[in-house]
Image (cartoon, rainbow, N blue to C red):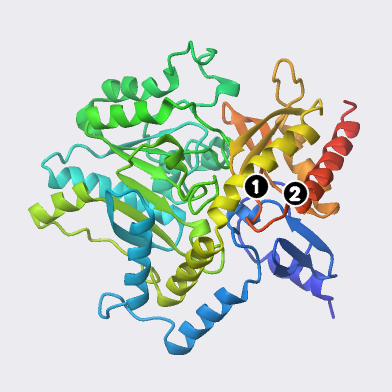
């Protein structure tokens, strides 16, 4: 009989598809406690990336388990088209209270990708209801990521995940990412006049404002740009351009939302009002699948005036079990002051990371906000030359760090979509300063080992 690990490996081959490149799993995740995950042998790992930037309150919180279990004992599922859902109503009220004042309605989904799809459809129908049916085209950014479904991938600009599906993706336009470390215009802030933001105005005019429905952006970069933080003027300019052309600004908070950047939502750092906000990941802290789109009151009014119905939905959306998980996670974030903790510890995380890691010849840039930090690896620190993609440098650092007991999130493609290695750090907000130092010491060792392998 195969042992537990061999059985799991054998079964894994029956799962079709592999998302995360060369980092093929070689251990079983047996259980989690607080900021730690444990494998089948009891070895402990610091979850320094919150899984896939999901785990904000930590693992194994019995308050969430109890809330979910109690809801399951009552009822796990019913069609919300036929029944009122008390937990759903409670959650919607909580989300609206936390969000910018203009966002007054919620549309629930099961994942961030579905939230993006929902926003694409809703933006088009909004313009249709206003008498502008030709406004159908969303605009995204290169080096961006909004999900794996066809619509979400079409508005995304992460080349590695788009590559083999080009013929079936929509040819929607993109503007460059606002990443100063790799300025697409080879300019320097602030004399650049924020050209990367005004690029949206240029492309809308080139395409024709009568065809553009929405602009999608993550406030702080995730998998595609690893903690990219646009300059202070960027989003106010984006808001101005969207308003000028009657284009909806869709703020993708799937990663940044629920405290990851030190505020409830990442866009709050810029004081800008979005027309829609996409939520997922930290919304339930990983305890159940759930996502949502928060919608501006002006959009609701247009539908109310025309009597239009948004015919859209998913069978499992807003089930009461996921609602119970989300409500409990929000309770914990609020009552324990974890958003404020994320901001304070985020400053400590970035300070200590610069102190411990900046001296490495392969660490080109450390960026991010709050408990979301990206570290870019480079072959040449002076020229910012990236490693050969064939080396999969970020995955190699990930492998060494995992062996030493620390989990990070490796990714690549920040340079023209095909080069550039980086990894994300996004620990649960309950982590301590001592645990941050321990994790950074492991990363220091892992990067040192990688550099020795490369003769740096």
Residue sitting nearer the eye, 15 or 309: 309
**Quadrant placement of the N terminus:** bottom right
Q: Residue 364 in the image: x percent, y percent?
A: 71, 26
Compare marks 2 and 1 and give the one earlier in the sequence: 1
Residue at the image point whose x is 70% and y is 25% from the top? 386
Residue at the image point whose x is 59% and y is 58% from the top? 56
Q: Residue 251 in the image: x percent, y percent?
A: 39, 43
Dots 2 and 1: beta carbons under 8 Å?
A: yes
* Residue 26 can be seen, yes or no: no
Question: Label 1: few (<14), some or many (≥20) within 10 Å?
Answer: many
Residue sitting nearer the eye, 401 or 283: 283
Give the labeled residue for mark 1. 345
* Residue 428 can be seen, yes or no: yes
Q: Is residue 77 above or below residue 430?
A: below
Q: In this view, does 335 lie above or below 180?
A: below
Q: Residue 351 in the image: x percent, y percent?
A: 70, 36
Q: Residue 49 in the image: x percent, y percent?
A: 67, 51
Q: In which quarter of the view is residue 104 placed?
A: bottom left
């Amino acid at each position: 009989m195969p042992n537990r690990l061999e059985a799991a490996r054998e079964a894994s081959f029956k799962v079709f598809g592999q998302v995360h490149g060369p980092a093929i799993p070689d251990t079983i995740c047996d259980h989690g406690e607080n900021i730690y995950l444990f494998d089948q042998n009891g070895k402990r790992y610091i979850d320094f990336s919150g899984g896939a930037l999901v785990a904000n309150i930590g693992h194994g919180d019995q308050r969430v388990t109890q809330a979910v279990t109690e809801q399951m004992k009552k009822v796990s599922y019913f069609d919300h088209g036929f029944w009122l859902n008390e937990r759903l109503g409670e959650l919607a009220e909580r989300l609206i209270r936390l969000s910018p004042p203009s966002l007054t309605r919620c549309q629930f989904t099961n994942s961030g990708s579905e939230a993006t799809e929902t926003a694409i459809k809703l933006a088009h129908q909004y313009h249709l209801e206003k008498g502008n049916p030709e406004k159908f085209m969303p605009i995204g950014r290169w080096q961006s990521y909004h999900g794996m479904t066809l619509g979400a991938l079409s508005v995304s600009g992460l080349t590695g995940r788009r590559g083999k599906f080009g013929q079936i993706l929509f040819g929607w336009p993109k503007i460059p990412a606002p990443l100063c470390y790799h300025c697409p215009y080879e300019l320097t802030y602030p004399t650049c006049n924020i050209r990367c933001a005004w690029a949206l105005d240029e492309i809308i005019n080139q395409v024709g404002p009568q065809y553009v429905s929405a602009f999608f952006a993550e406030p702080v970069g995730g998998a595609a740009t690893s903690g990219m933080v646009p300059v202070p003027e960027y989003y106010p300019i984006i808001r101005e351009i969207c308003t000028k052309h009657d284009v909806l600004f869709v703020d993708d908070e799937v990663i940044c939302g629920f405290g990851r950047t030190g505020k409830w939502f990442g866009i709050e750092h810029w004081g800008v009002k979005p027309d829609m906000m996409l939520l997922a990941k930290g919304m339930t802290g990983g305890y159940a699948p759930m996502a949502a789109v928060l919608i501006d009151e002006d959009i609701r009014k247009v539908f109310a005036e025309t009597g239009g119905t948004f015919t859209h939905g998913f069978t499992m959306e807003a089930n009461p079990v996921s609602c119970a998980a989300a409500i409990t996670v929000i309770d914990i974030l609020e009552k324990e002051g974890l958003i404020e903790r994320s901001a304070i510890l985020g400053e400590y995380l970035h300070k200590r990371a610069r102190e411990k890691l900046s001296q490495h010849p392969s660490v080109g840039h450390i960026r991010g906000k709050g408990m979301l930090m990206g570290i870019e690896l480079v072959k040449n620190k002076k020229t910012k030359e990236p490693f050969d993609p064939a080396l999969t440098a970020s995955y190699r650092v990930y492998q060494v760090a995992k062996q030493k007991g620390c989990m990070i999130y490796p990714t690549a493609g920040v340079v023209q979509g095909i080069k550039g290695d980086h990894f994300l750090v996004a620990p649960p907000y309950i982590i301590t300063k001592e645990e941050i130092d321990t994790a950074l010491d492991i990363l220091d060792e892992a990067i040192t080992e990688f550099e020795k392998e490369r003769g740096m």
